[in-house]
Image (cartoon, rainbow, N blue to C red):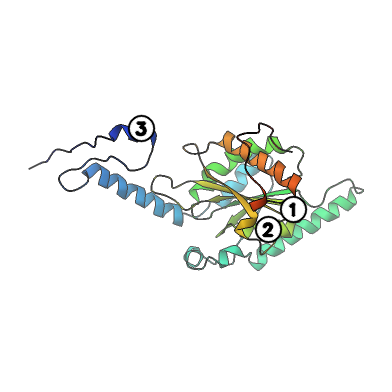
């Protein structure tokens, strides 16, 4: 015999959140559609963790809007090792270190050749990294950059670095190799059952290997259903301006963007 689903009286609250609340019940169990939706969300979250970042597609998209990119990877040889050994995801492999060193040397040579008018080291480097969800940077990194770069016209922006098998701290080594004042990681966050493509932004002033999480700031849940691109870009530009004024990020840098309309610095 088919048993009717008993609705939860809090059901109308679901219009305000994607959280799994007020699902109702069928007997002692959840309704079938809720069980199936949960299974689909779980599968999407697993796919987000294991899906590889399409580096070639990102490089082509960046090139189409006039942005140069460099591809690097961590010491984790594959996804399985990346998940089992977080420490390897925080360190550049040897070939990637050489790639960054070569770029910096050529930039310095070009600056000298230009008669001293050029700038060898960038003031800011953006890193697009797979992290724990390649869906996030694949979908949201370029739209976010499109919003924030026009607000950073007084910064010397370096090449966009695309990093695979990457943890947040990989950006410290990248920024250090390129001599950047600040590095911004655009990285896939741990997927949730309602958000498999959440993008995190991590900014670190004076990046170098060994920086701790207390020395960086994070803007989380960047995606159309969370913190939208214009809002995230304004917040990021504000924090970058304050970081430059303070010469620091992390505990020393507070997000006061909501109470201060002045952006950048």
Describe residue 229's horizontal placement relative to residue 180 as left or right.
left
Judge the density around disc 1: few (<14), some (14-19), many (≥20) Cα neighbours within 10 Å: many
SS at mark 2? Answer: helix
Q: Which residue is mark 1?
A: 180
- Image coordinates for residue 82, horizontal then vertical, percent: 51, 64
SS at mark 1? Answer: loop
Residue 161 in view (yes/no): no
Q: Which residue occupies the extreme right position in the image? A: 115
- Image coordinates for residue 28, horizontal then vertical, percent: 16, 48
Q: Quadrant of the N terminus?
A: top left
* Foreground of the two, 24 or 141: 24
Q: Residue at x 24, y 34 (%)?
A: 9
Q: Which residue is mark 2?
A: 174
Indicate which disc, 2 or 1, sits on the residue closer to the N terminus. 2
Residue 80 in view (yes/no): yes
Find residue 255 and report its image quarter.
Answer: top right
How far is the residue under mark 2 from the one under mark 3?
Answer: 43 Å
SS at mark 3? Answer: helix
Q: Are marks 2 and 3 in contact (CB under 8 Å)?
A: no
User: In the image, is residue 40 above or below residue 87?
Assistant: above
- Image coordinates for residue 188, horizontal then vertical, percent: 52, 51
* Foreground of the two, 231 or 65: 231
Indicate which disc, 1 or 3, sits on the residue closer to the N terminus. 3
Q: Residue at x 74, y 47 (%)?
A: 246
Depth-wise, is mark 2 or mark 3 nearer the camera? 3
Q: Which residue is mark 3?
A: 15
- Image coordinates for residue 26, horizontal then vertical, percent: 17, 43
Q: Residue at x 46, y 37 (%)?
A: 225
């Amino acid at each position: 015999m088919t048993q009717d689903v008993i609705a939860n009286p809090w059901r109308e609250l679901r219009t305000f959140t994607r959280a799994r609340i007020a699902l109702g019940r069928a007997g002692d169990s959840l309704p079938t559609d809720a069980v199936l939706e949960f299974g689909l969300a779980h599968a999407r979250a697993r796919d987000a963790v294991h899906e590889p970042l399409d580096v070639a597609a990102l490089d082509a998209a960046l090139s189409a809007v006039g942005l140069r990119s460099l591809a690097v990877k961590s010491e984790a040889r594959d996804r399985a090792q990346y998940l089992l050994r977080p420490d390897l995801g925080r360190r550049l492999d040897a070939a990637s270190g050489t790639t960054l060193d070569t770029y910096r040397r050529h930039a310095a040579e070009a600056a000298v050749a230009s008669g001293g008018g050029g700038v060898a080291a960038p003031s800011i480097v953006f890193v697009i990294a797979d992290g724990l969800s390649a869906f996030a940077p694949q979908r949201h990194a370029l739209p976010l950059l499109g919003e924030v770069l026009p607000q950073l016209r007084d910064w010397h922006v370096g090449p966009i670095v695309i990093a695979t098998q990457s943890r947040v701290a990989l950006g410290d080594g990248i920024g250090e190799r390129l001599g950047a004042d600040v590095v911004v990681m655009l990285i896939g966050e741990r997927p949730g059952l309602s958000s498999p493509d959440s993008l995190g932004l991590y900014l670190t002033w004076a990046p170098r290997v060994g920086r701790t999480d207390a020395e960086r700031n994070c803007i989380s849940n960047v995606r159309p259903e969370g913190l939208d691109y214009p809002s995230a870009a304004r917040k990021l530009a504000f924090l970058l301006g304050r970081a430059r004024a303070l010469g620091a990020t992390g505990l020393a840098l507070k997000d006061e963007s909501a109470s201060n309309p002045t952006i950048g610095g």
